Image: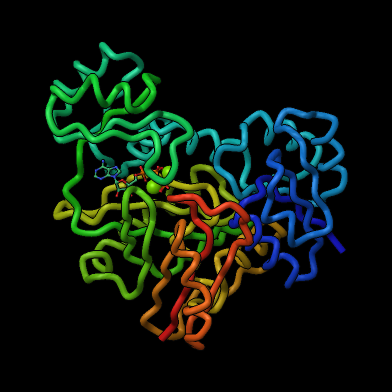
Amino acid sequence: GSTIGILGGGQLGRMLAVAAAQLGYKVHVYAPDAESVAAEVTAHHTQAAWDDEPRLAGFAAACDIVTFEFENVPVDTVRFLSGHVAVHPGGKPLEIAQDRLTEKSFVADLGGRTAPFAAVPTRAALDSALAAIGTPAILKTVRMGYDGKGQARIAAPADADAAWEAIGSQPAILEGFVAFDHEFSVIMVRGIDGETRFWDSSANVHEGGILAVSSLPPPSIVLDQQPAARAMMAAIGDALDYVGVLTGEFFATDAGPVFNEMAPRVHNSGHWTIEGAVTSQFENHIRAVAGLPLGDTAVPLLPVTMHNLIGAQIEKIPALLADGAAHVHHYGKTEVRDGRKLGHVTWVG
Ligand code: ATP
Ligand code: MG
Ligand code: MG
């Protein structure tokens, strides 16, 4: 059997590994962290740093194809591995998605609409950015943010000092605050031959910057804006010759869909596809990177609702198990922390 290598050891890697195993693959997880919930579902695991070239070379030799579940794998790691083994998607999409300025410029160059934005390399630049963008606005670190971490809202120019300090006084992007009706995501899979398929968009509700609920069908404004958002994602996929699952996060506004960010990987807002779609995002990602035919993305039964289990919400699992219709997912993480994604539950129909 062939071996698929996965860079990163979180729950996305765990669900990818389960999908790969279903298709008969061996899975080898490479992650620096001592705790890897992805490694726990396979016999093959390398725990080593992202820049440990001898260990990376050994991992590449053990794998037929490599992919990643974590958007902050260093680009150099992927470039190094690409010299030894096929890596999908490659270093380019990763490089773009890791830098919010590069990401928004890339999408704007392709004709996509983003929030107004300005580079904020220094504290002084924040004042000129605020003059250009206005308030309300959001200051975000250019790199490494997730789950709303590394962000500060700016209601008025007087908040500038506090916001700059709150994000750790580091290179940032200032974005105009988008007045949106709903948030939605477009999850797309693109095969090695360029064939592209989409799952229906869910409406996504965030609490405290963290995804709480994804549900279908979404409100009609999302359905209306889904075709334009899909066209945007298809253009990104073609420009990057992308292979695998690619997710775009959008705001539905009166002026049409506004691109927020992309993730060059499977996405939390697509967990419902495990039980809610004919083929899940995880299985289709494995099919795409392995060069297999893509599976059907249709949704046989509505409504579909996915709730994340964050922090202490994981304690609801016994009660959820008593509801025979609830599809319960526990990621097997040992440490319960506020704001940490520990599981999710999906209802179909
Ligand atoms: P993720 O966990 O999705 O990777 P992240 O930390 O990368 O999150 P964003 O997705 O950019 O951060 O922002 C988190 C949430 O904050 C968004 O889903 C949205 O609710 C809100 N938000 C971000 N940017 C804007 C904006 N320009 N205008 C209005 N709301 C915004
Ligand atoms: Mg993000
Ligand atoms: Mg986001």
Q: Is residue 201 above or below residue 134?
A: below
x, y percentage for residue 228? 30, 57
Which residue appears at 35% of the width and 17% of the height? 121
Q: Residue furthest top?
A: 124
**Residue 220 picture location, percent across and down:** 22, 71
Q: Locate residue 240 relative to residue 269 in the image: left or right.
A: right
Report the side of 279 relative to 209 (left or right).
right
Residue 258 in the image: x percent, y percent? 27, 48
Of 338 and 91, the residue lying toward us: 338
Q: Quadrant of the C terminus?
A: bottom left
- Is 347 or 335 nearer to us in this picture? 335
Task: Describe residue 216's horizontal placement relative to residue 92 as left or right.
Answer: left
Residue 224 makes an appearance in the image: yes
Q: Residue at x 54, y 56 (%)?
A: 266
Report how many numbered discs are placed on residues in the image.
0
Identity of the residue drawn at 32% across and 55% down: 206
Q: Is residue 287 left or right of residue 48?
A: left
Q: Position of residue 15 (x, y in %)?
A: 63, 63
Image height check: is 70 above or below 174? below
Task: Give the quadrant of residue 124.
Answer: top left
Residue shown at the point (42%, 30%) measured from the top left: 102
* Closer-to-camera residue (226/210): 210
Quarter of the image with the N terminus in it: bottom right
